[in-house]
Image (cartoon, rainbow, N blue to C red):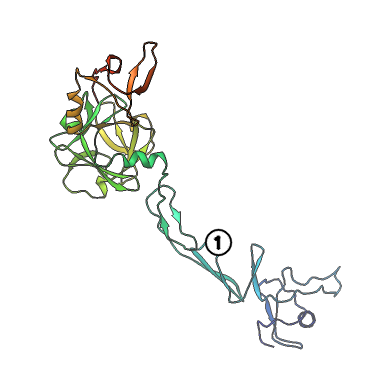
Amino acid sequence: MNIGIKPNAAECFKACVEKKKTISNINGVTISSGSPVNIKCYCEKGMTGNNGNNVWKTCKLPTTGCIVDGKTYKVGEKYNPNGDLCTSCECTLSGPQCKSYGCVKPKCANPILKKGTCCDYKCPVLSAGPNLKRYNKLKGKTIALKSFHNRYVVAESNGRANANRGGIGPWEKFKVELLGNFKIALKSFHNKYLVSEWFGGANANRVIRGPWEIFTIEFVDDKRVAFKSHFNKYLVAESNGRLKANRDVRGPWEIFTLEIIPSDLNLQRYNRLKGKTIALKSFHNRYVVAESNGRANANRGGIGPWEEFKVELLGKL
């Protein structure tokens, strides 16, 4: 009988007894004497004597497979232990033989592994809903960023970026470029991009937009945001007015108030209302009215004194 072919229990037991050999190797030993010959007996605990007498307990049948985590695999069968697709195993007569493969994950939080693959990771798409609406509203907008310390981010003429201005001027305005999946780039008044440096600094001196000039925007609420750099660090406004990109965790200093700067056309329209008296007509072709009892309605067919309103401009549209 060829080695590796499963004999019946009687054959295995007879060969073991005739050899008078205790078998303890789980991979088995070949019994080369007795009849039949060349039988491989596999015993988990081996054969043992009973009180010194020459009485032998039954030898277990030779295995034709591998038992891993309670599951049996046939000789020659390949499998992935514990579902680990980066480790490939094959059941052999000498037991499981395994090989592991290295895998590099992408640089993003909680990468997602494609089902049925070893290394096909993708970065998750950030939550949509209100945040996606907030993100899309920034398309083509010009913004200013106010820090926790009540100072505005500024792009200096020498290419540095700080967060030390008390008000908004041309240098404190940034043009937004949306790149999808909550990625964003900011271009300054000087036509240079805000950049996160590899050493944790922040400048506004890049002519071309590359990976270092791209940030992931995180919305805290409708007005407050945070920016995570290509190096997975948060933009931070230090108490001394410096702007850096070296924080691992988002705290108060890493959160900015986002102010959308109105377009020049809208600002002109706004300023034209200064000191004016206006009337408001609804979709239903009726005018808003201030009733004498303090109520406001929108049910008048024409304009009289009660349908007129004096405009007071308070700034920031």
On the image, the x and y values in percent for residue 288 come to 33, 22
Note whether 306 is above or below 286 in the view shown: above
**In this rendering, position of residue 172 left or right of residue 149:** left
User: Pointer 1: what residue?
Assistant: 83
- Whether residue 208 is situated above or below residue 24 in the rendered picture: above
**Quadrant of the rendering where the N terminus is positioned:** bottom right
Would you identify the image quadrant in which residue 95 lies? bottom right
Is 215 above or below relative to 83? Answer: above
Rendered image quadrant of residue 53: bottom right
- Identify the residue shown where x is 74% and y is 68%: 45
Farthest front residue in view: 301
**Percent coordinates x, y for residue 7 in the rendering:** 73, 82
Q: Quadrant of the C terminus?
A: top left
Q: Secondary structure at mark 1?
A: helix
Q: Residue at x 40, y 46 (%)?
A: 126
Residue at position x 38%, y 49% from top?
A: 108
Of 284 and 234, the residue lying toward us: 284
Q: Is residue 64 left or right of residue 168?
A: right
Q: Nearer the viewer, residue 118 or 138?
A: 138
Q: Position of residue 106 (x, y in %)?
A: 38, 54
Which amino acid is tagged 1? Gly
Q: Position of residue 186 (x, y in %)?
A: 23, 41
Crowding near the residue tagged with mark 1, few <14, some 14–19, many ≥20 C-alpha atoms within 10 Å: few
